[in-house]
Amino acid sequence: MKWEENVRKVVPYTPGEQPQKAGIIKLNTNENPYAPAPGVARAMAELDAERLRLYPAFPEKTDLAKALAAHYHIGTDQIFIGVGSDDVLSMIFMTFFQSDKPVFFPDITYSFYDVWADVYRIPYETKALDSDFLIRPEDYKQPNGGVIFPNPNAPTGEVMPLTMVEEIVKNNRDVVVVVDEAYIDFGGISALPLIEKYDNLLVVQTFSKSRSLAGMRIGYAMGQPQLIRYLNDVKYSVNSYTMNTTALVLGVEAVLDEAYFENCCKKIMETRGRAEEELAKRGFVFPKSCANFIFASHRSVPAREIFEKLKQNDIYVRWWNKERIENYLRITIGTDEQMEALYRALDQIV
Ligand SMILES: *Cc1c(COP(=O)(O)O)cnc(C)c1O
């Protein structure tokens, strides 16, 4: 068809499977195994449907922005809220990566980055992680059109010390540097304090992992007000009302209940500690994880085989048929009971 010449052709991002089957153990998309803070259920029950008659409030004017600002000790003008961090990151690509020079990110990383670069026609260059799957800050010293990386990185789970993050930000003052902190609450140290010092730094976080609200879709970027204004200008030029009223109301509860949040993260980190022992006992090797997953490879059994066999047991983990990582499984940390079921299944497989 002739019209196909004018189509924006992209290879879409492929998320992990979301099997609609009861009773499965789902350790493939880094969701939180625990329910959101109890206040979320309460607020949901109390939400008056009448409110949905109106368009939602502007996120930056809501209690959600105020709660986040208070939690992080920054101004509401330093926060941009979007429909999950995927929306926030997509807006960031559209807003800040307008250079002819390539945007830099690691070769093994969140596999959405190259998809956004492609869909927005942004040139990019990947920088190979070293043999221990670590980012080499010196790779990010050449001229570029922007830099983005997750910290902790996904799918490796490895965290970069703050001094190295700062080195990358400092060496790239002419472009925007984005630190995607989707997993920072599981033991990493956030780059957030650096936003006061660097006007080119954006720190992105999400409610999907540590706050158990993947289904609600809330993410946010934090940076100096000028960066946030630029983001809002683009966002309000695409779709004024991205955040729905329900998300804006329920999100507040997940931020206010700090004790619940901290306990949840602590439980996951403790389960992760035990998982390291149990997996090592069964012949797996893995880099030290600071996230809610472990990126593990077995000494003798191929990852693909383990992946398939676990699936036959209704246990879903993530596997990529991709150079350098095809022999690794990314296993989300579930509840202790879910992990026990995983170990029992692995005993039959490896
Ligand atoms: C999960 C994840 C996101 C996106 O999460 P949202 O659900 O869209 O907030 C972004 N970056 C990384 C590295 C992730 O793992």
Image (tube, rainbow, N blue to C red):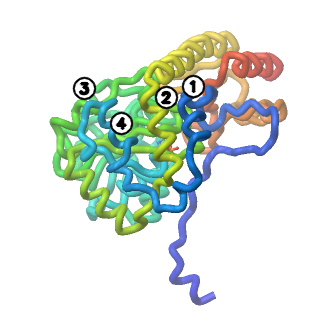
Between discs 1 and 4, the one toward the N terminus: 4
Return the disc, 1 or 2, that comes first in the chain's sequence: 2
How far across and how far down the image is residue 65, in percent? 35, 43
Circles 1, 2 touching at the beta carbon (< 8 Å): yes
| Above or below, 78 relative to 240 | above
Based on the displayed image, in which of its 4 quarters is residue 92 positioned?
bottom left
- SS under mark 1: strand
Say whether residue 16 is left or right of residue 181. Answer: right
Quick one: label 2, few (<14), some, or many (20+) residues within 10 Å? many
Q: Distance between the residues labelled 1 and 2?
A: 7 Å
Position of 279 with respect to 128 (left or right) is: right
Task: Judge whether 90 appears above or below 187 on screen.
Answer: below
Q: What residue type is labelled 1?
A: Ile
Of 110 and 246, the residue lying toward us: 246
Q: Which one is earlier in the sequence, the residue at label 4 or at label 2?
A: 4
Q: Which one is earlier in the sequence, the residue at label 2 or at label 3?
A: 2
Tell me the residue that label 3 is attached to.
163
Towards the viewer: 184 or 62: 62
Q: Identify the residue at image location x=27%, y=43%.
A: 76
**Residue 157 got which mark?**
2
Element class at badge 4: helix
Task: In the rendered structure, find residue 68 and report the number of the disc placed on it.
Answer: 4
User: Which of the two labelled residues, at mark 3 and mark 4, occupies the earlier sequence position?
Assistant: 4
Q: Which residue is drawn at 78% across and 33% down?
A: 24
* Residue 70 sits in quarter: top left
Query: Residue at the location (65% across, 38% down)?
Result: 319
Which labelled disc corresponds to residue 294?
Answer: 1
